[in-house]
Image (tube, rainbow, N blue to C red):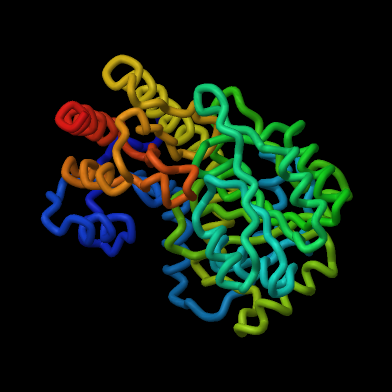
Amino acid sequence: MKYDFETVLDRYDNGSVKWNLMKKKKPQVERGIVPFSIADMEFKNPPEIVEALKDCLDQGVLGYQTAEPSWYEAVTGWTRRRYGWETRPEWFYTTPGIVNALYHGVAAFTEEGDGVIVMPPVYYPFYKAVEENGRRLVRCPLIEGENLLYSIDCEKLEELASKPENRLLILCNPHNPVGRVWTREELMEVSRICLKHQVFVISDEIHCDLIMPGNTFTSFASLSEETEKNTMTCMAPSKTFNLAGLQASCVIIPDQERRRRLKAQMAKVSFEGRVNALGYKAMEAAYTKCDAWLDEAIQVIWENHRTLKQFMEERLPEIRTAKLQGTYLQWMDLRAFGWTPERQEEIMTEADLFFDEGILFGPEGKGFERMNLACPKSVLLDALSRLEKAVRQNA
């Protein structure tokens, strides 16, 4: 491989949120332990991005910045090149993060007391974005299928969407934490339901670049012109290229009136649609120079997934694992052991295994763990060895 995905990084004292949460949970944890919780990578950033940031810093000025035409060419070129979706520069609006955009989107496109539909188990900030805006959380749980292959309960979705008080759906595509990449056919049915019942869609597509071999990503808004106008798409290079700390993302809103409403909502907290100067440079470099790095990163993540699956089948068959279609987040089912969530976390912490406990994603996640696979293979193998030992001692 051209790029380095095997160097084990030491982020113990560099302010990493993921690592600091591990130390808070277990202050005596040894320095060599790597956590597998929050979704950022244990890989070095693409060197092309690092060089672009160095060039920016060498200019010696970090004043107020706005998006240049080259930035718009980069983001529209990315959606066209990677997904066949023709987007326009005026559809884009930069935000300091996808979660930030979710909060403002919920506030902009619903009224207090309106229902917002989510599909648990799902990324837990979805719940907060709804409830902290004074909206009503409406649950449409995914259907757990054979071998942890989840599907959308479209019958339930239609029932909920038909109620006029339910005005918004937050879609996760690919779905975090279960790793599904929704097919075009599945998305078409969701779109049909939402258009029929005038339910607007916020589609969180932050993991859309991390698609495993044999799967194809379809951006929800790209389905049709009608769907395009009924969607706010959230995208960012933060998961794809490990840039979360730069707080640079964007939303795509083809409908002019919807764009106006979102901008008006964000203006209430004096946000003017700009991100930091380095964020613009990093995004532009990522979307114009880093295709090869991403292709290799996906190979590494896929190989880690295959390694984990084989290990579980041979050594820990009690733990079921979902086949990863997208994201670098492995959904693991530990329900066979019958542990309470508290006991399960106690066992994991004792073994220096720091995952995201499944119950964070909703009650449907009880007995599960979400494991970050974006790490060197040696780190993964060490964790699997400790997991086997912990299970044997506590089963």
Residue at image position (42%, 62%) is: 245
Q: Where residue 292 sits: x, y (%)? A: 52, 36
Question: Which residue is at the front of the view, 114 or 41?
Answer: 114
Question: Which residue is at the front of the view, 240 or 107?
Answer: 107
Residue at image position (33%, 61%) is: 17
Residue at image position (76%, 42%) is: 190
Question: Which residue is at the front of the view, 381 or 190?
Answer: 190
Drawn side of residue 6 relative to residue 237, left or right: left
Up/down of 77 relative to 298, above or below: below
In terms of image quadrants, where is residue 325?
A: top right
Q: Is residue 73 visible?
A: no
Q: Where residue 252 sits: x, y (%)? A: 72, 58
Q: Where residue 352 sits: x, y (%)? A: 19, 44
Up/down of 275 relative to 231, above or below: below
Residue at image position (56%, 64%) is: 280
Drawn side of residue 56 relative to residue 270, left or right: left
